[in-house]
Image (cartoon, rainbow, N blue to C red):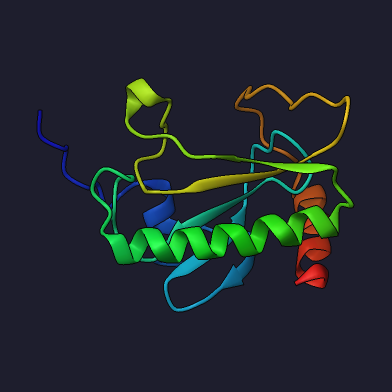
């Protein structure tokens, strides 16, 4: 079965073009890191490649390498920023794999012993909390 075409009207494409707001915490030549607006824990952020790709299934090796490099950097950073016990890294591919937004992205979530991740309810976090958490991560960079 062939891979569906990339839809340049997805929310992350709009964010990357500056058409939608975001709380950006890191950027390099190939990637951008933003706060998740529906976090499953404090400090939940997303690594996005700047170039279009639906997911791992159509991304080229250079893009995947850039995303992996930024993911590792940000995993260490959020662990430090929140004094977390660990970090959960998630990445989903296609609807059957749990993907909801069809632009390659990696979730990074600081984790704490004995604390479960919040459920994905679709409820948005208030902007002040997101901004405060973003500031913590920026300070740890």
Q: Residue 125, percent across and down?
A: 73, 39
The reply to whether residue 19 is in sight is no
Front-most of residues 110 and 95: 110
Q: Residue drawn at (68%, 38%), measured in percent from left and top?
A: 39
Position of residue 85 measured from the top left corner of the image (x, y, whole percent)? 85, 42
Q: Nearer the viewer, residue 35 or 11?
A: 35
Q: Classify the position of the C terminus by image quarter.
A: bottom right
Q: Position of residue 56 (x, y in %)?
A: 33, 45
Left or right? Give the position of 19 relative to 82.
left
Please, is residue 140 above or below residue 3 in the view?
below
Using the image as rendered, state which of residue 94 and residue 72 is in the foreground. Answer: 72
Q: Position of residue 25 (x, y in %)?
A: 66, 66
**Residue 26 vs residue 60: left or right?**
right
Q: Residue at x 36, y 48 (%)?
A: 103
- Quadrant of the image occupied by residue 88: top right
Give the vertical position of 47 relative to 6 (above or below): below
Quadrant of the image containing the N terminus: top left
Q: Name the residue: 46% across, 57% down.
A: 48
Whether residue 41 appears in this view of the structure is: yes
Judge left or right: residue 43 versus residue 92: right
From the viewer's perspective, is residue 92 above or below residue 63? above
Q: Residue furthest bottom?
A: 29
Number of marks drawn = 0
* Residue for point 52% across, 65% down: 69
């Amino acid at each position: 079965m062939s891979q569906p075409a990339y839809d340049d009207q997805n929310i992350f494409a709009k964010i990357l073009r500056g058409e939608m707001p975001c709380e950006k915490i890191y950027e390099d030549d190939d990637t951008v890191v933003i706060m998740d607006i529906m976090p499953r824990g404090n400090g939940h952020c997303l690594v996005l490649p700047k170039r279009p790709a639906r997911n791992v299934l159509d991304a080229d090796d250079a893009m995947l390498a850039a995303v992996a490099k930024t993911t590792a950097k940000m995993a260490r950073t959020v662990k430090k920023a929140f004094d977390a016990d660990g970090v959960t890294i998630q990445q989903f591919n296609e609807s059957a794999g749990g993907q909801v937004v069809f632009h390659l992205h990696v979730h990074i979530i600081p984790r704490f012993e004995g604390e479960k991740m919040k459920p994905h309810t679709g409820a948005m976090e208030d902007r002040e909390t997101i901004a405060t958490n973003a500031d913590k991560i920026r300070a740890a960079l």
